[in-house]
Amino acid sequence: MKLLVVLPLWALFAVTQQKALSDDCQCELISSEKQFPYDKLKAAQDAALGCINTITPQKSAALDSLLLGLSRRLPQLEQDVAMLEKEDDGELFGVLSLHIIENELAEIQQMIDKLNRTNAESDRLSENVAQQLENVKEEMEELEKFDTMQVVKRQQANQRLKRDLDQCRNNGVFPTIQPTQPIGGACPHGRLVNITGPRVHTAGEYPGSYKYGAWGRDPKPEPGKESWHWRVMLTSSNRYAHYVRLYSSLSSLIVGISVPGNVQIHPSNPTTNTIQGPNVVLYAGALYYNCYNKDAVCRFNLTSKGVTTLDLPKGTRYNSKGDFCHLEECYPFTDLDLATDESGVWVVYTTTQDHGNLVLSKVEEGEPPKLSRTWRTSVYKRSVTNTFMACGVLYATRFVNKNTEEIFYSLDTTTGKESFKVGIFINKVSSDILFLNYSPVDQMLHMQNDAQMLSYKVLFQM
């Protein structure tokens, strides 16, 4: 049986009139899923970023520093008041001690006022941020509904597994691999977090006479000399000195009563083994300084009056060829910077082979003294205005303006780690810092600020 198909003539005509096929294929995809709201995700990201920028680590650290400062200052005030009650002679000492206590009370009141303001601001910020975070949380929960493939939930599960694994490792299930580098933070005081003050501000007995000089306390004094202070003034051309001036107490230094007086290195100034430059320190009854016209450290024993020298490495820059500087000027004859901390004496310098970068060496006591370990840094010495050591860490400052100096750099000698983000600011009374040294006896930072002598409290945090 045959099947016949009858095709009308008009149907054939219609097929032949259809449009020729194109090379482009256009398809319309209609998804059953809702469109992802990218605008809401962007808004949530912006809100989270706003929270991060609102409460910064610096703001939290500021509050911690204020609390730490008060916890340290109040016991010190009690000690000063007790000493005044015990040793008040009704004359000069009592007047000076009372003046110092009044200054301490004023500074503590300022800290309390600032703490109250900071605390109120923190409370307000916390309330605002808490509400913003709650809103962000709600938005993210809504956005998770679009995660049909459960990617976010799997990531959260992986994070929980990782946390559990870390807990097992910390609890001793797995052996702990010992670090190849020694752990830092050996300082008994903790980490340096702030500098407050100045607590002492005086021109001494020669107001405005000597711009360049140094002063401080002996970190390792002889018995009976624990309260003694010393001062070196560059009396010749703001470059040279040949004696150290001693004071029986801080009060004596402030009013300019020098007892026992001067200890002379040499009658002439300058001459062989006298002082060149302002960066001088006193340690264990000996004065350490840059020897006149030499790339060497001199040690002058105040008791025996003997001088021993320590030659620095070949290529060490001296005679104002490796000074501390800022953009507008350099400080002459600051090639060598002597420093003290809890462990003893250090020397900061630079050499030709180090291309002008800071070099730090530990000075070992002995007859004669000698250099032990040396650290090379990546900070250019002429970009630094001064340095000091505290608890085995080297700190460097730079000029900000005539009222402010910044501690911007540190080198931890235990770990060898450098940091260019210290960010601690020091208030000055004049433009140039010409001497800076840390006293481990009372955790004070002594400064020669042009012709003014200043001291600051160094705050540490465990």
Image (cartoon, rainbow, N blue to C red):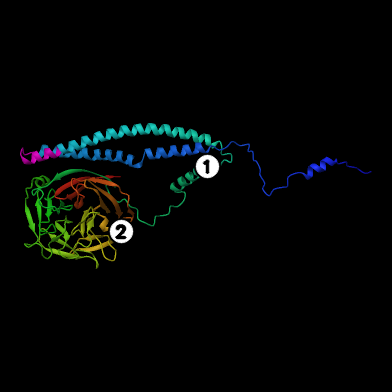
What kind of residue is marked 1? Ala
What kind of residue is marked 2? Thr
Q: Residue 377's mark?
A: 2
Residue 119: in magenta span: no
Q: Is residue 327 shown above or below 403? A: below
Percent across and percent down for residue 8 are 85, 40
Q: Nearer the viewer, residue 393 or 450?
A: 450
- The CA span between labels 2 and 1 is 45 Å
Residue occupying image coordinates x 83% and y 40%:
10
Res 199 visible? yes
Instruction: Say which label, 2 or 1, has the lower sequence index.
Output: 1
Q: Nearer the viewer, residue 247 or 397?
A: 397
Spot the residue most to the right. 1
Percent across and percent down for residue 50 are 41, 38
Percent across and percent down for residue 358 are 27, 59
Q: Nearer the viewer, residue 66 or 353?
A: 353
Viewport quadrant of the N terminus = top right
> Left of 57 or right of it: where is 314?
left
Residue occupying image coordinates x 18% and y 45%:
429
Q: Mark 1 falls on what kind of element?
A: helix
Magenta-tinted stretch? 88-101
Please give the residue where the numbered disc 1 appears in the rendered image.
Answer: 157
